[in-house]
Image (cartoon, helix red, strand yellow):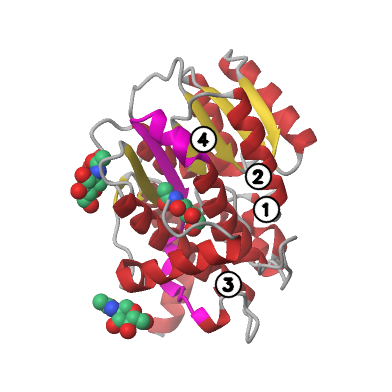
Amino acid sequence: MFGLLLLLFLPFILYLTAPKIRKMLSNGVCTSTVQLPGKVAVVTGANSGIGKETAQDLARRGARVYLACRDVQKGELVAKEIQTSTGNKQVLVRKLDLADTKSIRAFAKDFLAEEKHLHILVNNAGVMMCPYTKTADGFEMHIGVNHLGHFLLTHLLLETLKESAPSRIVNVSSLAHHLGRIYFQNLQGEKFYIAGLAYCHSKLANILFTRELARRLKGSGVTTYSVHPGTVNSELVRYSLFMRWMWQLFAFFIKTPQQGAQTSLYCSLTEGLESLNGSHFSDCQLAWVSAQARNETVARRLWDISCHLLGLPVDW
Ligand SMILES: *[C@@H]1O[C@H](CO)[C@@H](O)[C@H](O)[C@H]1NC(C)=O
Ligand SMILES: *[C@@H]1O[C@H](CO)[C@@H](O)[C@H](O)[C@H]1NC(C)=O
Ligand SMILES: *[C@@H]1O[C@H](CO)[C@@H](O)[C@H](O)[C@H]1NC(C)=O
């Protein structure tokens, strides 16, 4: 009897609580009024979702914003849209395919030839739950794009970030890192592979790196942050039918890309955040990371292996 009543009332209860839950889920708004004239920003994966919103906000504040996109044509359309909505003509599109180290090196080379400065780097692009595939360099796609690709990009742009200090690097990670583990014997999913978990592993790698990088950048004036954007309706779920269904089912609870961009913006802009470098943020607040993500031994080892895989010196 009680069960039946509950069942009858459940939709009603959900209906009443949904706005509250939604508000809770979408809290955290970047209220910074910082303006960015003369500043240069790069946003990866900027032609849709959170990346696009982040780029748009930075452009509105007057920065010169580079949209680093795999699909340049689509990027150009987005750039036009942002130029129109913000009145800032300095929104530029450059080709960047994070699944190909040649493309990453070409992007960095051209960028450095064009620009003397870089103040904000938002490592936003990501893939989620794609079937087992490899990057041009033979890395498993999630670890290859989400981690190694951004690792190389950050490395190539770091000198310029240092010269432009105070500057910031923001890494879009995820709450999903809690499910992630770094299996050094199975980094590329050679032995076993579960698409959903591969995403979590790569997001854990993002956090480990943010912390390791923060340690290494001590005193350089470059500070680094990792971010959980929230559960956001974006193209990230494009590879998974199941996830697209889930997203539709729970659409009401899910953040818009604009809400999802708030924490990235908060970490890119908020004054006085420097002492919290290396930290993880969610809803524009400090957030807990898993024990794995705090493990310095794992962070160091992953750093060394990543350098080795990419043919980079270990100290940079
Ligand atoms: C962001 O993540 C990439 C890949 O894990 C890493 O190489 C880079 O150092 C990170 N940057 C920051 C600021 O955390
Ligand atoms: C970054 O954080 C560390 C502590 O984790 C601190 O010692 C260092 O001074 C900070 N760097 C900057 C530029 O504030
Ligand atoms: C870090 O991870 C390693 C390997 O997984 C483990 O042996 C070690 O106990 C961990 N250290 C801490 C402080 O959790």
User: Would residue 297 appear left or right of 37 to someone viewing this image?
Assistant: left
The CA distance from mark 1 to mark 3 is: 20 Å
Residue 176 showing in the rendered view = no
Residue at (29, 54) in percent of width and height: 215
Q: Answer with mark 1 or mark 3, whichever residue precedes in sequence.
A: 1
Q: Nearer the viewer, residue 111 or 192?
A: 111
Per the model, the C-alpha gap separating discs 4 and 3 is 25 Å
Q: Secondary structure at mark 2?
A: helix
- Picture coordinates of residue 171, whole percent (x, y): 45, 49
Q: Which residues are magenta?
A: 157-184
- The quarter holding residue 189 reads bottom right
Say which residue label 4 marks.
54
Residue at which label 2 appears = 105
Q: Are marks 3 and 2 in contact (CB under 8 Å)?
A: no
User: How far is disc 2 from disc 4 in space, using C-alphas?
Assistant: 24 Å
Dot 4 alpha-carbon crowd within 10 angstroms: few under 14, some 14 to 19, many 20 or more: many
Q: Which mark is residue 198?
A: 3
